[in-house]
Image (cartoon, rainbow, N blue to C red):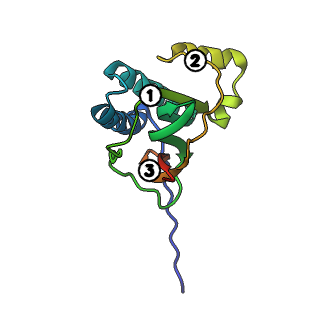
Amino acid sequence: MSTSYTTSTANTFTVVHARDMAAKVSTDLKRMQRLYGLPSDADIAAYESEVVELLRRGYLGTAFYGFRRDGKWIEPTLRYTAHELAAGDVNDDPGRVRPGQDVAGATFYSYLTYSSAWDRLTPADQAQVKQALPIQRVGAALPAVHNGYFADDKTYSAGGRSLARASVRSYA
């Protein structure tokens, strides 16, 4: 006679989970601030609130925070991509923003995309959500990476969702 067991778990993603993940983004941005002088505390707080709200509702696609020179991402730039939690995902500690990068002549910039759940909202619902966010974003083209690429380096997870972090790395 053989016996089999089945277990199931249900993850409910809450604002607490969203805050936990957004706090890790905020910690990364504070490290960037200590190393490079930007973003400001007020901007970090706004980015964190934006990530919390969009994650909580399932509307965050990808968020980029970093430096641009000549309209292209350079080191240090971070990209966070929201996912449903896959088997084997981990919950890393924030940090490891690379020090010593040349940001002379560069400006700090953030760019955000929305999820497929966002695309299913009506334009009126999208406008209502956007109005409640701390950052009023306008349309823009996604910057390319200058002489480099995004390398996956961390995963932040909670409540059945994750944020995959990638950092710009230069070819040179």
Task: Indicate the quadrant containing the N terminus: top left, top right, bottom left or bottom right.
Answer: bottom right
Q: Which residue is painted at 32% across and 44% down in the image?
A: 99
* Quarter residue 102 falls in: top left
Residue at the far bottom in the pictured view: 1
Count numbered badges in the picture. 3
Nearest the camera: 165 or 133?
165
Residue at mark 2 to residue at mark 1: CA–CA distance:
31 Å
Q: Which residue is painted at 55% across and 46% down in the image?
A: 147
Give the crowd class for mark 2: few <14, some 14-19, many >=20 residues within 10 Å.
some
Q: Which residue is painted at 49% across and 49% down in the image?
A: 170
Give the crowd class for mark 3: few <14, some 14-19, many >=20 residues within 10 Å.
many
Nearest the camera: 49 or 67?
67
The label on residue 155 is 3
Q: Which residue is mark 1?
A: 105
Q: Which residue is mark 2?
A: 130
Looking at the image, tell me whether mark 3 or mark 1 is earlier in sequence order. 1
From the top left corner, tell me how far across and down residue 20 is, in percent.
Answer: 36, 38
